[in-house]
Image: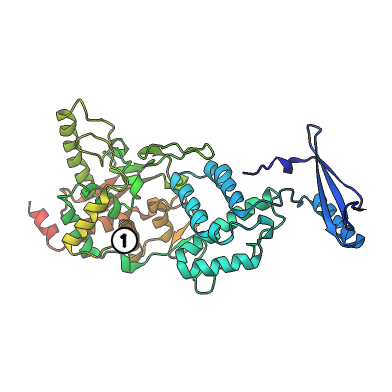
Amino acid sequence: MFSLELQNYIDWDVQSVFKRIDRSKFAYRVVLKFMDGTKHMRMYSGFETKKEAEDARKITIRELANGSYVVNDNVKVRDFLDYWLEYDIRKRVQSSNTYESYSSIVRNHINPAIGSKKLTEVNKGDVQRLYKNRAEYSKSIVRQVKTVMNVSFHYAVSHKLISMSPTEGIDLPKTVKAKSYHTRNIDTAKTLNMNQILLLLEESKDTPIHMQVLFNVLMGLRRQEINAVKYTDVDYINRTLTVERQLGKELDRTPNSKREKMTKKELPLKTPSSKRVLPIPDYVFEAILEERKKYEQYKSRRRTIFQDNGYICCSSYSGRPRSKDFHWKHYKELLKRAGLPDIRWHDLRSTYCTLLLKKDFNPKAVSKLMGHAKELITMDVYGDNANIIPEEIPELLTYMDEVMPEKSNGNIVKNSVQDIIIDMDKYLPKGKSQERNKT
């Protein structure tokens, strides 16, 4: 591992060109001076003529003057990336997932290609070949490679490890379709339609992941947000849910740490915009109430071992929250049993998003409801609007009403937090409204 301390010089001197005694070639020395009075000397030699040495000396003086002089010019790419991951990324990212994703891209895709090269020797051709090779492997992977290369080499420039980044101006191969800035594209072929959603909700009732399915497809929560939802997050009067934490693996900020960390640690959300207050559909609200009854029964029966932490999606035996992969086996069996497409768990969240957009929801509102920080889904570029969610809640509740297998009593949905009253009768499946009026 290298050190960046040599970059902290406060003064410098470039000595005159001289001819080496032991060789018939020319050289010159650079002296770097530090705050504590110490000096570091570097010699550049091997020039065939005095003019060549003089020209190189002038370039060095110019680099020292404009701050682009590189002291650590023997650093290998793999050593630099290891340093960058540990001393920059590990300290800045919000979760272990991001850190591990960056590490995987470095380890499996960048280092095998250019890891043995000196950082100062990497050129635009190397970057182009890397992108072309990884594009043939995977279009999603090459996009991540480009992100890591851009961010890491920008760090190298800012810390004077290279004078300019070879990634500047290098685009992905034409075979990789560029994504619009801050835009998320969703493949509608991998989402469910309304009838399939109804079937999924019905079939999931007898599974341990029923609540997880509801929070995903009817409220658009992320997997780690779902596992972190507590009963105290529910406003039972206004029927809203506050999303304010996630469960995941804690990232140790200590460089090169190998300590095992908790995998169900309460962590901050993905971004500040991920914290949001969502209206709870009647169907989900009733399910939460039923789940709470079961929770109290479990707690009463197993007082010595049940951990009363208030997680909605928890073990009926211990009260501990579900792990991030608990749903996997049950979900795949559920899809197979119901005869539904074999889509990913995350595609349920995309289903929620897609159906909202198909009903002409404001993309900015959908972005807010999904907890996205700066991106719009499929259509637009993020624009701040503090009142966007209240304006869209009537449409949201309309959609939720349409996917409810059963309608609760009462023909009015109230949300005093958003100060909205909506008559939902006209949106009920045919026949339900008449049946309720007769009672």
Q: Where does the image place residue 241, in percent across and percent down from the top left?
A: 32, 43
Q: Residue at x 47, y 53 (%)?
A: 104
Q: Residue at x 20, y 45 (%)?
A: 287
From the viewer's side, name the closer residue of 13 and 387: 13
Q: Where does the image place residue 11, in percent across and percent down from the top left?
A: 83, 41
* Depicted 251 relative to depicted 405: above or below: above
Number of marks drawn: 1
Q: Where does the image place residue 175, in percent across and percent down from the top left?
A: 50, 74
Identify the residue under disc 1: 351
Left or right of 362, for residue 169 = right
Would residue 416 be visible to someone looking at this image? no
Q: Where does the image place residue 277, in percent across and percent down from the top left?
A: 36, 45
Left or right of 421, for residue 43 = right
Q: Residues within 10 Å of mark 1 (few under 14, many from 20)?
A: many
Going by the numbered disc 1, the residue's amino acid type is Thr
Q: Residue at x 50, y 54 (%)?
A: 107
Residue lying at the far left of the rendered structure:
438
